[in-house]
Amino acid sequence: MIYSLGKSGLTPIGVSANNAKNSLPIGTVLILNGYSNPKFLIVRNLGIDEKYGYGARYKTVSLEDGRFRQHEAY
């Protein structure tokens, strides 16, 4: 759950954690843990994985070598 911080403390804003990761905006930089922590830039949201019914797929470009890849949000 995502919260807003205000005068009365934390207030839920109604977006589940799963929905938040299914709609990452174009331009978001992903930093993957391990293997030298590669960085990728989201260039397109490919939608929810139809095979599993959850987890958005994103087209990304490597900030190190410019190659395009696809990553999934779980």
Image: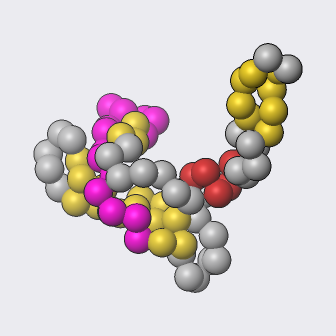
Residues 3 and 18: in front is 3
Check residue 33 for magenta coloring: yes
**Whole-percent x, y for residue 10 in the image:** 80, 26
Locate residue 50 relative to residue 31 in the image: left or right.
Answer: right
Q: How many marks?
A: 0
Which residue: 58% across, 82% down? 51
Can see residue 24?
Answer: yes
Residue at 41% across / 71% down in the picture?
46
Reply above or below: 53 against 3.
Answer: below
Which of the 4 image quadrants contains residue 74?
bottom right
Residue at the limit of the structure toward the top, as seen here? 7
Q: How is the image coloured?
A: secondary structure
Q: Residue furthest bottom?
A: 51
In this picture, is 7 found above or below 50? above
Residue 12 in picture, x, y percent from top left:
80, 39
Q: Quadrant of residue 13?
A: top right
Q: Residue at x 71, y 39 (%)?
A: 2
Residue at image x 79%, y 17%?
7
Coordinates of residue 65 in the picture (x, y in percent)? 14, 45
**Residue 34 falls within the magenta-colored stretch:** yes
* Front-lying residue, 17 or 11: 11
x, y percent for residue 33: 46, 35
**Considering the image in quadrants, where does the N terminus appear?**
top right
Q: Is residue 45 above or below residue 62?
A: below
- The residue most toward the front is 7
Q: In the drawing, does residue 46 fall left or right of residue 61? A: right
Q: Quadrant of residue 69?
A: bottom left
Q: Nearer the viewer, residue 32 or 4?
A: 4
Q: Which residues are magenta?
A: 32-46
The reply to whether residue 35 is in sight is no
